[in-house]
Structures are given as structure tokens and as C-alpha cells.
Amino acid sequence: MNRRAFVRTSASVALGGAAAWPKLLARHPADRTRLILLGTGGGPRPRTNRTASSQVIVVNNAAYVVDCGDGVARQLAAAGIPLTTLRHIFITHHHSDHNADYGTLIQLAWAVGLETRLDTWGPPPLDKITRLFLEMSAYDIRIRIADEGYPPLAPLVHTHELTHGGTVMTDDAVKVTAALVHHPIVEPAFAYRFDCPDRSIVISGDTAFSDSLIQLASGADVLVHEAMYLPGVDRLAARVPNHPGLRQHLLASHTSAEDAGRVAQAAGVKLLVLSHLVPADDPTITDEMWSAAARVHFRGPVIVGRDLLEV
Ligand SMILES: [Zn+2]
Ligand SMILES: [Zn+2]
């Protein structure tokens, strides 16, 4: 186990407000566990202001990516995380706003020089998705091997299908634990907890209010929780007339910002980060409105996520 110095997240820092975070974090030691929000918008709709769901945790120069929404490889590049440091991919569930660029991330990491083992974790049919993506991309892979001397890609990729909660993996720096969450009708859907040398980080994935997530997140330093702003949901549903089940799906399968605060309070987390925001692009909903909703039940600090924010 890595014995690096323990760097505690300071609540007083978080209370300084979201705008203060990036500069303050720049003064942390270089070997601190990093969490970068790559995409913070909920749902598959491409937007100019937020990309689809993804985040990366970096420990000891190894990147652990959670979810692969549209544009994840480009967001990693924008965050300054070399794709060759990719070691693990975790998929929370197989909605396309979480997995659309899963295969693309693997292919592009290899294309820019990944030569080391890559483990991927997530619900079925992860094996089939991986296999079919490699098959779909076989032409590019084959000609790059023949023409440019790349190593074969398939032997680098090791998939692990998860069907229940519990310990997912451990290495010399990180322990990852999964919990089943409630995201009907997608089953199974997971939240992941990362216990790193200097702090613990929980990623909710997509979930309705979930007791299992409260247990998973108990005492965590950071909880990244999906969130809806309920008054905006009706406006969003009205903008999408050809999707009559949208409002019902959102209310049954996701969590309001108020309930995200309730989960954070019940779990006793030290910092709540709202992400996977729904609506993601309603200009009438300000950061203060998001955080005020979460603070109805959560007495700790709240950050409203934005793309490429380091927490
Ligand atoms: Zn989603
Ligand atoms: Zn989903």
C-alpha cells in the first residue's frame, strides 16, 4: 500500500465556493489523488456547454475513468491527462450517455501509444460490447499494426462483467467497491467507491434515491451525485415533444438535487458534487439554485460540477 502523506480535504476550502477550487487545488502536492469531472451533463443530447457523463481519478499517474460519454477521449486530452496513462475503465450502466465512447476511448488510447494492460469493468454485456467494437474497428487496428508497427490491441484489453455489488478490484493504491443502485429499467446499474491513499471518492452513476448508495458513500470525502432540478424537468420535457416517456423516466430513475443532498447528509460525506445535471442546458437555472436545492438537506459544502473542473 502506498504510504504517501495523507492530505485531508478541508471543508473551509470547499466553502470558499466553486470558483475558488481550481486555483486552490493547484497548490496541492503533485501526488495528490486527482478527481476531474470530464463531462457533467445528463442524458445523450449533445450540448455546447456540457459533455456527457464521465470523470477521471488519477492516482500515481494511473488514470481510472468512470463512464465514457460522448467525447471522453477529447475531454481527457483537454484535462491534460495522457491517454497512455489509462489503466482502468469503469462503466456504471449501459445508457449511451455513459458508454457511447467506451470503445472509442480504448481505440484512441491505443492509437496514441497505450502498450500496457487495460482493465474494463461494468455490467453485462460489457464483454460483447468490447468484442464487437474491436471487430468493428478491425480494419483500422489491422492496418496500423501492419503499417505503423502497433502492438495488437485485443490482448491489452481485459473485460470484467459485474453482476453484484462488493469489492471490484484492488491494486497497490486503490480499492474499488461497487454497489447496485436503482435506475429502472436498467439493471444492473452501479455506483463505485474509490478508496485512494489520501481520500475516498464515490461516483453515483445514474440512480433514483438509493439506500445502497448511502451505505457505499458512508463517510466518504467526496460524493459525486447525479442531480435533477425539478422545476426544470417540466420545461425540458416540454421541449422534447417526440419523447413522451421522458418526464416519467426522469422522475422514476433519477435523483433530485434535494434528494442528492439527503443522500449526502445520510452518508455523512464531507463534500457533495452535483453532476450529470438534468436539465444540463437551461440558462435560467443558476449554480446557486442547484446548490440551494442540495442544501435543503445537506449541511456540508456543495459544488455544482462543470466540465474539466478538478475537485
Ligand atoms: Zn445518464
Ligand atoms: Zn442512465
Image (tube, rainbow, N blue to C red):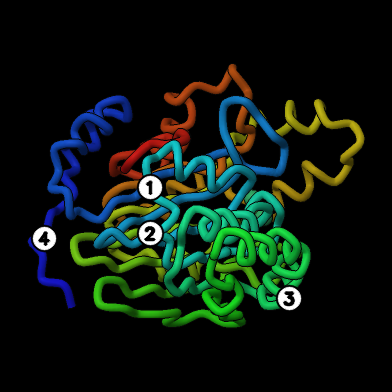
Instruction: Tell me the residue that label 3 is attached to.
Output: 128
In the displayed structure, 105 sits above or below 74; it is below
Looking at the image, the residue that sits furthest to the left is 5
Looking at the image, the residue that sits furthest to the right is 242
Q: Is the distance from the Cβ of mark 1 to the nearest ligand 1 atom less than 8 Å? A: no
> Residue flagged by tag 1: what amino acid is it?
Ile
For label 2, the crowd category at 10 Å Cα-Cα, with few meaning under 14, some 14 to 19 and many 20 or more, is some
Report the residue at 57% width, 82% height from top.
164
Instruction: Tell me the residue that label 1 is attached to.
Output: 81
- Earlier-in-chain disc, 1 versus 4: 4
> Residue flagged by tag 2: what amino acid is it?
Thr
- Earlier-in-chain disc, 4 versus 2: 4
Q: CA distance from mark 2 to mark 1?
A: 7 Å
Q: CA distance from mark 3 to mark 2?
A: 25 Å
Q: CA distance from mark 3 to mark 4?
A: 40 Å
Q: Quadrant of residue 84?
A: bottom left
Q: Tell whether label 4 touches label 1 (CB within 8 Å).
A: no
> Residue flagged by tag 3: what amino acid is it?
Lys
Relative horizontal placement of residue 302, taking residue 38 as reference (left or right)? left
Instruction: Tell me the residue that label 4 is attached to.
Output: 6
Relative horizontal placement of residue 172, taking residue 84 as reference (left or right)? left
Q: Quadrant of residue 13?
A: top left
Q: Kindly report which numbered mark, 4 or 2, lies closer to the viewer in this rendering.
A: 2
Report the residue at 48% width, 48% height from top.
260
Residue nearest the observer in this picture, 236 or 211:
236
Which quarter of the rendered picture does the N terminus lie within? bottom left
Secondary element under disc 3, as helix, strand or loop, is helix
Residue nearest the observer in this picture, 65 or 178:
65
Q: Tell whether label 1 touches label 2 (CB within 8 Å).
A: yes
Secondary element under disc 2, as helix, strand or loop, is helix
> Residue flagged by tag 4: what amino acid is it?
Phe
